[in-house]
Image: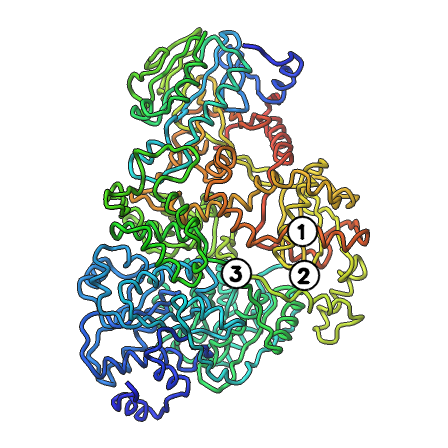
Amino acid sequence: MTQIPARITDWFAAKGWSVHPHQQDMFDRAEDPATLLIAPTGGGKTMAGFLPTLADLAQRDHAGLHTIYVSPLKALAADIRRNLRGPADEIGLPIRIEDRTGDTSATQKKRQRVDPPHILLTTPESLALLTSYEDAPRMFAGVQRVIVDEIHALAESKRGDQLTLALARLQSLRPDLRRVGLSATVEDPQAIAGFLARHPDPCHIILADPGPDPDIRMLETKEPPPWSGGGAAYSVPAVMEQIKQHKTTLIFHNTRAQAEIFFHNLWLANEDGLPIGIHHGSLDRQQRERVEAAMVRGELRAIVCTGSLDLGIDWGDVDLVIQIGAPKNVKRLVQRIGRANHRYNAPSKALLVPANRFEVVECVAALEAAKAHDLDGEPRGAGPRDVLCQHILIAAAAGPFKADTLFAETTTAGPYFQLTRTEFDACLDFCATGGYALRAYDRWQRLQQRPDGRWQLRDPRAAQRIRMNLGTIQDTDTLKVRLKRNRGGKPLGEVEEAFAASLTQGDTFLIGGQIVRYEGLREMVVEVSRRADRKPKVAVFSGTKFATSTQLSDRILRMFAQSDWPQLPAHTADWLALQRDISRLPQRDRLLIESFPNDGRENLCVYGFAGRNAQQTLGLLLTKRMEETGLAPLGFVATDYATLIWGLDAVTDPRPLFQLDALRDGLETWLSGNAVMKRTFRASATIAGLIERNTGGQRKSGRQATFSSDILYDTLLKYDPDHLLMQITREEAMRGLVDFGRIEAMIARIGDRIDLLRLDRVSPLAAPLFLEVGKVPVKGAAEERLLAEESARLLQAAGLEPG
Amino acid sequence: MPLASPIKTREERIMNEVTFSFVGQTLHALGSGALWWPDQNLLCVSDLHLGKSERIARRGGPTLPPYDSKETLTRLSADIARTNPSTVICLGDSFDDLDASMAINAAEKRDITALQAGRRWIWIEGNHDPGPIELGGTHLFECTIGSLTFRHIAQAEAPAEISGHYHPKARLKTRGRSITRPAFLVDQARMILPAYGTYTGGMRSSDQILCKLMDDRALAILTGPAPQVIPMPR
């Protein structure tokens, strides 16, 4: 095909549009094995991806599946279906376009496998699931193209690794399959190309015109932001004013809990009764769909949302994006801003609303970075082996396979091209026998080798269990929330199980913008009633955690070194001056440490400005020394800038904590017993299929039968420390930490230039750290001391003799 | 059974157990979750769930690290070495099912036989292992020793009863953090032991079932390196 068919160019002309240069490029390269398009949101990216498909379908009849479209979000799949239907009808293509996600009904799914549509819009998990069925070869028989949308977002997580393995599978079924990736602006396009293409196929990169720079500013408010806190309630009047001045405003938050609180406050201030909605991943599907539909009809003036609306969904006429809280990542900020003004060649408009004064500093640094096109990002590591283990199980669910063939197929996936046969065999052995030093499961292997050498499931019923536990997203256990009624009231959404466990009858909390009262737990459903209170008692469920980090440290340190701060609002400049006055501002070649009591505990704040991974490692090292020197640490939290450690006793002399020999001594044991490792183990063990989230039966309400994954970790550590999953755990944990060597070098460099300041209360700069997520508990002597203290108090209160 | 030096043993005991009175008897709750009754020279453990990993794999589940039985027996042998009991009672659900009792490996069978040597060993039946097993010792539905009755599941009107089954655990909120541990529950009439097995979870003492079983003045003894007594959290 050399020319875009007239039916399609006519349609463009009728719309008054012309084909963009990058759309033409994509069409010209339709026969390439892999093509990556990098274009800003609103640049006709989706049309560029589908153009070769529509052209092909316009010129010849095609039976069965032609193109698979994969996106990271269910909502995006549904949105693309709507946006593709119109052009297909107008061009006059009698084709079926359907989506298939976790939200699709079982009947619809079954029908799609028997009689697939021409274009199937799906997610990585649903695609992997399709490859797990025995009839996959038949369903995928005619597939020509696969389009991976928002590939930059998928490449950031294990969902992307899983997708490349599913694509490798598809390519084995359809050797001529052509791959297309659609990406927002990224720092390393070549890495994304290598991720998309079949190894070692070439992948051409098409760079669309990035359009004008976005117009990003900080929102000016009359009220100054607080010292600490993440709610940004102070900004509500100013945000309300912006909503009134614009047609449609998207208000992004970093966590679901913050979105709920902000929406509540906005609603209380909404005197004109403007139509404002809320949208985040914990809300009930019907609720989300109602908000989405209202937005498509242009009925909403503002939507308070989280990452669930993050990606290029083309809804309505958004003319302003507001980001509440510091953008933790400059790249994401730029991508989010792409949401506003979805017209090519018009600058996007965005406002940043820092939630506290430290975030003012961060926002100013982020604005400088965005202006300088200084995108941050970490290089992708090799494909993780826990995802490979799951892939082997998925392959087994589809039918018997040869190890040689599966290995060869796996190494065509970009992230796995360097995988060795030994590594592959270890994963296969883990799937088959558990891979333990003690051969315990010879009779009960999960996979068995048949006489012809192929591997298959010992128990065919296991296929169903594998499918039910497919995926790499680590959901925390959640419980449904419903209004209490005789026969089950309206579903409102979900809360984390740990949050539900903390509630007692009568507690009130926010969900979907409403205040509800906790009534009780029935058959694993949280029952609530509506309340008209103005203030919820318990406001926070932890929601999604924001893990990615910025590289803004240097810019911030440079700012701190200034004698005054003309670029900052007066309130924040005053705040920094106060920090300088009562403590100090961190400097590049010294290490500032503050020690102060707060809320009945002693705190130590170490301002290393070394990036989150290094600060996390520092937290592990310092708590080790604190435990050894009897300071009873309880936990720590790390940001890009500092590590905050809390415990029972005050640190008065930092020197014993920083002794290199003592830090090194027993480090292995300390690290292996740490909560970071256990958390990592749980995620990897779940992905690799050792822990099943779903067992088919109902979850037991009394939890006698389930036991903590920490026990499995402890057992392996003691009896089989070199087991594959322990290797994977160490590897994965190290992605979030830095080498001890680098910390050692930092400590050596600082030498005795450590400034420990004893303060009588929390300092201005330390205040925001108390609300950081990702706290790491330290289990040591402090726990026993707290238990003894509290039990003595309780027994005394009960009038009993302490035992 | 040779003991470590008496002084060290004494210290360990002070750190690692709680002594309390139950229907006129002096009992010791060990930090490991075992119950020691010095007057009868008796050690009691509940819900060992030996063979659990094997049973899960046999039923098509994941192949968990197959070291749970070994770990459970290692801890039990440490408690036996420390107390040198003349009687050991395993209070039911000692095996994850009856097939698991057959399937435990030769080394583990040898370990059990070694532990049984020279003492009375009583297997109480549990809901997971409701029948005789091919290992030494006596198999009983329940038994009464001195003034105390040992059975797997607590009965409604049963004074001076020691049982297991529920895997109780208790949560304590302290100023630093909230701490959850397997726990002994004890009141005027009955005592419920925590699960001793490695791969076991727990039921909160605040669960309705446990709240109904235990009277208003019930205590919980949290296990761990330094066990602690608290009013039972409800």
Q: Looking at the image, can residue A722 be seen?
A: yes
Indicate the chain on which mark 3 is placed. A
Instruction: Residue A530 in the image: state x and y as whole percent.
Output: 41, 55
Instruction: Indicate which disc, 3 or 2, sits on the residue closer to the N terminus.
Output: 2
- Quadrant where the image shows the N terminus of chain A: bottom left
Q: Amino acid at mark 3?
A: Gln
Q: Amino acid at mark 1?
A: Gly
Q: Residue at the spot x=35%, y=71% of the render?
A: A179
Identify the mark at residue A227; answer none if there is no mark: 2
Front residue of this view, candidates A207 and A404: A404
Q: Residue at the spot x=70%, y=47% of the render?
A: A603
Find the distance from the CA under tag 1 to the CA under tag 2. 35 Å
Identify the mark at residue A499; answer none if there is no mark: none
Indicate the chain on which mark 2 is placed. A
Quadrant of residue A221 within the rendered picture:
bottom right
Identify the mark at residue A741; answer none if there is no mark: 1
For the residues carrying marks 1 and 2, which lies nearer the camera in this image?
1
Check disc 2 and report its element: helix, strand or loop: loop
Asked if badges 3 and 1 are on one and the same chain, I answer yes
Front residue of this view, candidates B177 and B84: B84
Residue receiving disc 3: A258
Q: Name the side, left or right, on which A482 lies relative to A575.
A: left
